[in-house]
Each structure stands twice: as structure tokens, then as C-alpha cells.
Amino acid sequence: MSLVELQGIKKFFDNVRAVDGIELEIEDGEFLVILGPSGCGKTTLMRMIAGLEKPTAGQIFIGGEDVTALPPRKRGVSMVFQSYALYPHMNVFNNIAFPLKAQSREKKYDKRAIRDKVENTARLLEIDMLLDRRPRQLSGGQRQRVAIARAMVTQPAVLLLDEPLSNLDAKLRANARDELKEFQRSSNITAVFVTHDQIEAMGLGDRIVVMSQGKIQQIGTPQFIYDDPANEFVATFLGSPSMNILRSEVFSFGFRPENFLPKTLADNPENSRIFHYYIKRVEYLGSDRLLYGYVHGHDNELTLAKVPSNVRVALDVDCDYEFAVHNSDIKFFDRQSGQRIEQQNLQGVV
């Protein structure tokens, strides 16, 4: 069943259409990632689910109940903010216990019940040994766990996470992604995660919602969106490096750098498109060689190739080579709308 349903959600700030007609269903127990560049409306959409922003139009349902007009405390959701927003004068125990104490008049939690809930949640996130510490005595990863514990202690129906890993360094962020995903699976909670980082989105999401300019561009599993982008925006937003795009007068076509390999390495050259490729620069990135160059006939469009370093093929700068892309790995887009179109004839284009 769909735990969260968004029907025709819009949010306008004067003449700015921050969110413009969102239709979305989030399944019970799903880890959904909302991905997009800064200013695309993803955080505004999350804030409307939380009740922190009121929609200009549309309805929000949680568990089948229309919560569009309900205040945040009555929606059964919790939110983890980018800054964590921990109280510096409180220890970890009191930070986690704060929402329970705030609800004590409605749900009448006694001190023993609050202690049990805090300790159980802290144990689940492996921070039970930190309950007496203040936030300044914690590492970034520990603060993140405290923020999640504070959101989880009320046992919400939906956990909302607004770029909670952005303050961590790269190594700690990778560990935190693994821990967060494992925690979500073990608790079976419905999670909505907002980010502009495509690596986080690909690594965490059961499904990804790609947004741009207040609209949904595509919804699907990470692999589906990566392999079959719905339009040129999605194709170039996902991937590191992003998809190469070459343009003709009528259409554009693209291929991933890792699918653009020397002809001698092609698995099936008879079903591949051969390009004459001039290499301008080579970057050695440890596991890969990243090549910068130009396809013949498209000298104004920088094209990248990603070749594994363990492939012993001589690739020198200021030299021409034959590179191949399998036909199935070439995607075609309409020049005007940017939408995917059926395969086109490349004869005379390259």
C-alpha cells in the first residue's frame, strides 16, 4: 500500500513556481530519494510533507488520511535537518528525549517510559554509550546518529531526511550511507531522503525521484534511471562523469564515458558504432584513466572516455584512435524538448 500520496502538489512563492504539480506515491517501508540540483524544489516538497510549508494547491495523504491541513505534530512524521539542530546545552539523552517530553501532555509518557524509549533507540543506533555526552564532544557521524535517534524515538510513520550527510567528510559519508541504509532496512521505516548528491541517491534509494524546476523528470530504481534516462537532463545529471551529449541539427545523442572504449576492446564491434576520437588530455585516477578529447565532426563538444587502468592499451595525447559504443548504449533525445526519442540514423552525423 502507498503510505504517502501527493496529489497535484504545488507551491508558489509570488511568481516563483517552487513545486509545480507533483504526483507521487511512496510505498510503506520504502527508502525514496528525491534528487535534484539546488533550487529545484526538493526541500520545499519535503517541508510540505512535514507540514512546515502549506501547499498552494493539492493534497497530501499519509496512511490514507488527508493531512494537508494538519500541523506537523499530528502527521506522524519526523525530520532530520541538514544542520542536525542538536541542543548544545543538553546531553545526548536529553536531546533524544526532547520530543517525547514535548508530547508528554498528549501521550502522557512517564519518566520510566521516556528512559526506556531513549535507551532502546540509542541501542539500535549504537550510541547508547554516548548518552551522557554533549554534542560538542561528539564526532560528525555521532551527531548524525543522535539526530536520527531523536527523530526515531517517537516511532514516526515517515522519516524525512534533508541532506543529513552533507556535513560529513567523504570517508565518513560512505560509512554513514551504509549505516543509514542498514538501519532503515532493519527498522522497516518509510524514509524520504533529499539530496543533490547523485552518489548518495544511487547508493541509498530503492527508488529515485529526479526533480528539476519544480517538476518530476523521472521516477525509478537507480539502475533504471541510469541506464534509461527519460530526457537529456536526467542523462547528464546522473553519472560521474556525466553522459556525453553530441548534437546534430535534428536530434542529440549520448553515451556514458564507461561505454566509450577503444575499438579493440569492444565485445561486439559489428553491433557497435565506431567513432574517430582525438585525445587531448589524460587523467590517471588510480582505478581508471579519464580521457578528454573530441569526436570527429564534433570538435566543439568535449567528449570523455573512462578506461579501466588495468586495461593495457596505449592511449597517448594528441593522437587519433577508433573508439566504439555498442548501439544499445547510445541514447537519442529531441533537440527542442530534450525528451528521449527512438533510435536515429547516425549516417552523416559522425
Image: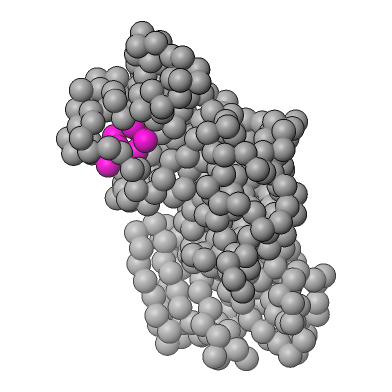
Left or right position of 337 against 177: right
Q: Position of residue 345 (x, y in %)?
A: 80, 80
Q: Is residue 195 above or below residue 138?
A: below
Q: Position of residue 19 (x, y in %)?
A: 63, 61
On the image, which quarter does residue 191 sit in? top right
The reply to whether the magenta stretch includes residue 204 is no
Q: Main SS of the magenta segment?
A: helix
Q: Position of residue 346 (x, y in %)?
A: 76, 81
On the image, which quarter does residue 268 sit in? bottom right
Q: Position of residue 7 (x, y in %)?
A: 75, 49
Left or right position of 18 against 25: left
Please state, as top left, top right, bottom left or bottom right, where the N terminus lies in the image: top right
The reply to whether the magenta stretch includes residue 146 is yes
Please state, as top left, top right, bottom left or bottom right, where the C terminus lies in the image: bottom right
Name the residue at the left extreme: 137
- Viewer-proximal residue among 302 and 154: 154
Q: Residue at x 59, y 49 (%)?
A: 48
Q: Please provide the residue range marked out in magenta.
A: 139-147
